[in-house]
Image: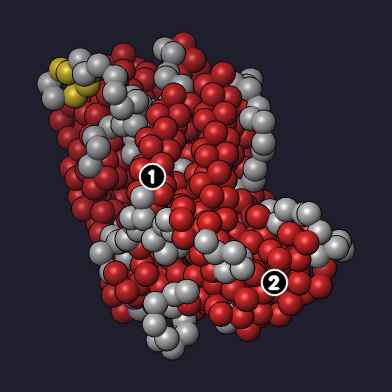
């Protein structure tokens, strides 16, 4: 996520100094102070790895309190899992040579698979289970008895880093995140309502525009989850933001159904349609869709008001996550092979003291699994590594050069930490990523200790291995490429088509209409991401949106017809279900007409069911051979 998203659109232009806003300078100052606090406490407690506390601060360098605290919680959880796994692996497979490396490869694959099935900081926690094993068990591969004390020391250092970040953010009043999310949701609401208003005028939005909107809405899911840790009313704000997000998807789905209807019918035509034919059904469908769009839009506004007030919304929705098991499994298998190939290279080369390089290989592989494109992440790491080595060398041998006083350490670290934190705050995703990785790697290579070590041989070997690690991961990814965007798109579209064929089956897991639509929107977001965030591939976007629209309409039909199955309209409802199973537009329209006549004879209202059936007839008309203009 972008680290500079701390101000809402429409606010006054922020103060700028040296090209950076005041909020960016405040963020950089908080990172520097938290780093110093973490190091000071670690030195005072004489921890084995005080640099881990500083690294934790660099990793948790996020602009708002909610984002930092949520990631801190998952960092502690991932570390605990990784320490436990390190103890088990080292205890069971120590002194087994190649088998131990094979177990490491399998563990990395499992962690990457789990990360692929999650999102946001939950995926980061899964990846951290891998990096913790790399930094504890792999680095202690020749001394398994040191795994437990090393794990305890690392956990203590990370806890100190988390507490330092929390304290500094609280004392210096790090900004809250809910105003930013409220503004973004408001902007998305306006965009969705623009589409809906165009649909009411008979203007259909393109599939690319709709896919882009769904991508922007679904992408908020992991960020909304961070509100839980922001304050005491965080859970209520999370529920409100999540409900607004889910309802926005429903509004867009309804708007696309409205836009797909034929041009509006004149009142005289509707009045003259005495036999209740197609024109009357279209009028009923159009009126119902307009009313439902207005109702759902009001629900979005109510949820946004609850988000600002810190209260629970009138209607609470979950936001189910869609993830492809096939894609996650292939990603896990490929990363396991990458690590195994590099480990085999080290075994055959017989290089001594390569544990550091091998552990960094696992770290880069694991963290890359949480990025949309692992190879791009590796390229960014490959760029950041030499810069980090240069900065660490300058700090160690030019700035400090034998100094051991903490006050001088604080002053010397200020330009590097503050400068890289400012780089993190930039809106450019590339520059922000380079700044974050450079800050993390600089602190890792510099490795502040008490007293500080100035052995040039150790520094050169460390610098060589960290650069070699990123180069080897990149080479392994060239030899066995990660899943391409094209293949991920094919798999996701194939899964969407398969689900569409069974969406009205009782075997499908039951979800409310709104939540099921959001789950499909999460798949659209992954399809757009697989296309490098671009919606310019019209054919792919059209197919993805076709599956999205038809699945939403079929679910609505199923719910409406199930509601009528036990009443006076049970017989026409069963006929409509049979027509839906055939996906025949004319048969669906005919059963809708029969249902309307039956409801009229009994004095009942079935407008919502009629609207769903007419929408289904329109949606499936394009799948039939050309027979002239509908209806």
What SS does tag 1 mark?
helix
10 Å neighbourhood of mark 2: few (<14), some, or many (≥20)?
some
**Mark number displayed over residue 56:** none
Apparent side of residue 619 relative to residue 364 in the rendered image (left or right): right
Residue 495 visible (yes or no): no
Q: Residue 305 location, x and y as percent?
A: 54, 24
Apparent side of residue 309 relative to residue 451 in the rendered image (left or right): right
Q: Residue 91 location, x and y as percent?
A: 68, 60
Residue 343 sits above or below residue 461 on the image: below
Q: Nearer the viewer, residue 351 or 625?
A: 625
- Dividing the picture into quadrants, the one containing residue 179 is top left
- Dividing the picture into quadrants, the one containing residue 93 is bottom right
Q: Residue 40 location, x and y as percent?
A: 44, 19
- Residue drawn at (54%, 64%), measured in percent from left and top? 273
Apparent side of residue 98 relative to residue 22 in the rendered image (left or right): right
Q: Nearer the viewer, residue 114 or 179?
A: 179
- Residue drawn at (74%, 77%), measured in percent from left and top? 575
- Residue drawn at (30%, 51%), measured in percent from left and top? 462
Gap in Å between the C-alphas at discs 1 and 2? Answer: 31 Å
Residue at which label 1 appears:
197
Residue 266 visible (yes or no): yes
Q: Quadrant of the N terminus?
A: top left
Q: Earlier in the sequence, mark 1 or mark 2?
A: 1
Colour scheme of the rendered structure: secondary structure
**Mark number displayed over residue 594:** 2
What SS does tag 2 mark?
helix
Residue 489 sits above or below residue 389 on the image: below
Say which of marks 1 and 2 sits in front.
2
Q: Nearer the viewer, residue 286 or 79?
A: 286
């Amino acid at each position: 996520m972008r680290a500079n998203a701390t101000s809402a659109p429409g606010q006054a232009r922020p103060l700028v100094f040296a090209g950076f806003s005041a909020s960016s300078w405040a963020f950089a100052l908080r990172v520097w102070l938290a780093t110093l606090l973490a190091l000071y406490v670690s030195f005072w407690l004489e921890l084995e790895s005080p640099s881990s506390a500083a690294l934790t601060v660099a990793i948790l360098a996020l602009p708002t309190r909610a984002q930092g605290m949520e990631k801190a919680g998952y960092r502690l959880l991932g570390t605990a899992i990784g320490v436990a796994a390190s103890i088990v692996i080292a205890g069971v497979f120590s002194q087994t040579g190649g088998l131990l490396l094979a177990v490491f490869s399998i563990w990395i694959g499992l962690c990457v698979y789990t990360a692929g099935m999650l999102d946001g900081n939950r995926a980061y926690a899964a990846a951290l289970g891998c990096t913790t094993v790399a930094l504890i068990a792999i680095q202690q591969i020749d001394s398994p008895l040191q795994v437990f004390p090393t794990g305890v020391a690392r956990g203590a250092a990370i806890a100190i880093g988390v507490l330092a970040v929390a304290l500094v953010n609280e004392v210096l009043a790090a900004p809250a995140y809910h105003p930013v999310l409220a503004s973004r949701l408001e902007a998305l609401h306006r965009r969705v309502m623009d589409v809906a208003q165009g649909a009411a005028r008979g203007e259909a939005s393109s599939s690319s525009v709709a896919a882009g909107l769904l991508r922007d809405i679904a992408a908020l899911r992991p960020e909304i989850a961070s509100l839980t840790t922001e304050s005491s009313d965080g859970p209520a704000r999370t529920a409100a933001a999540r409900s607004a997000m889910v309802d926005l998807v429903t509004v867009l789905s309804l708007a696309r159904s409205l836009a797909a209807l034929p041009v509006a019918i004149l009142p005289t035509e509707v009045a003259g349609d005495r036999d209740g034919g197609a024109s009357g059904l279209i009028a009923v469908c159009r009126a119902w869709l307009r009313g439902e769009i207005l109702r759902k839009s009001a629900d979005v506004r109510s949820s946004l008001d609850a988000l600002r007030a810190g209260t629970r919304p009138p209607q609470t929705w979950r936001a189910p996550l869609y993830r492809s098991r096939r894609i996650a499994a292939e990603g896990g298998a490929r990363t396991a092979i990458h690590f195994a190939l590099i480990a085999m290279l080290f075994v055959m080369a017989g290089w001594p003291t390569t544990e550091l390089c091998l552990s960094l290989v696992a770290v880069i592989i694991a963290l890359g699994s949480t990025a949309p494109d692992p190879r791009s992440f590796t390229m960014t790491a490959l760029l950041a590594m030499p810069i980090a080595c240069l900065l660490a060398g300058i700090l160690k041998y030019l700035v400090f050069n034998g100094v051991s006083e903490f006050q001088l350490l604080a002053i010397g670290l200020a330009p590097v930490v503050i400068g890289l934190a400012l780089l993190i705050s930039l809106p450019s995703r590339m520059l922000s990523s380079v700044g974050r990785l450079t800050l993390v790697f600089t602190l890792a290579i510099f490795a502040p200790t008490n007293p500080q070590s100035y052995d040039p041989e150790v520094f050169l070997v460390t610098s060589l291995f960290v650069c070699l690690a990123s180069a080897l991961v990149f080479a392994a990814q060239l030899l066995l490429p990660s899943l391409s965007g094209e293949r991920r798109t094919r798999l996701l579209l194939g899964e969407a088509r398969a689900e569409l064929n069974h969406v009205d089956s009782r075997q499908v897991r039951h979800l409310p209409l709104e939540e099921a639509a959001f789950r499909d929107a999460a798949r659209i977001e992954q399809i757009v991401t697989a296309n490098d965030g671009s919606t310019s591939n019209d054919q792919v976007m059209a197919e993805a949106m076709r599956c999205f629209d038809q699945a939403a309409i079929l679910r609505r039909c199923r719910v409406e017809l199930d509601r009528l199955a036990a009443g006076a309209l049970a017989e026409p409802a069963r006929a409509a279900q049979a027509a839906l199973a055939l996906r025949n537009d004319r048969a669906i329209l005919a059963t809708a007409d029969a249902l309307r006549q039956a409801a009229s004879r009994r004095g009942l209202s079935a407008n919502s069911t009629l609207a769903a059936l007419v929408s289904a007839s329109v949606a499936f008309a394009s799948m039939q051979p050309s027979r002239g203009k509908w209806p």
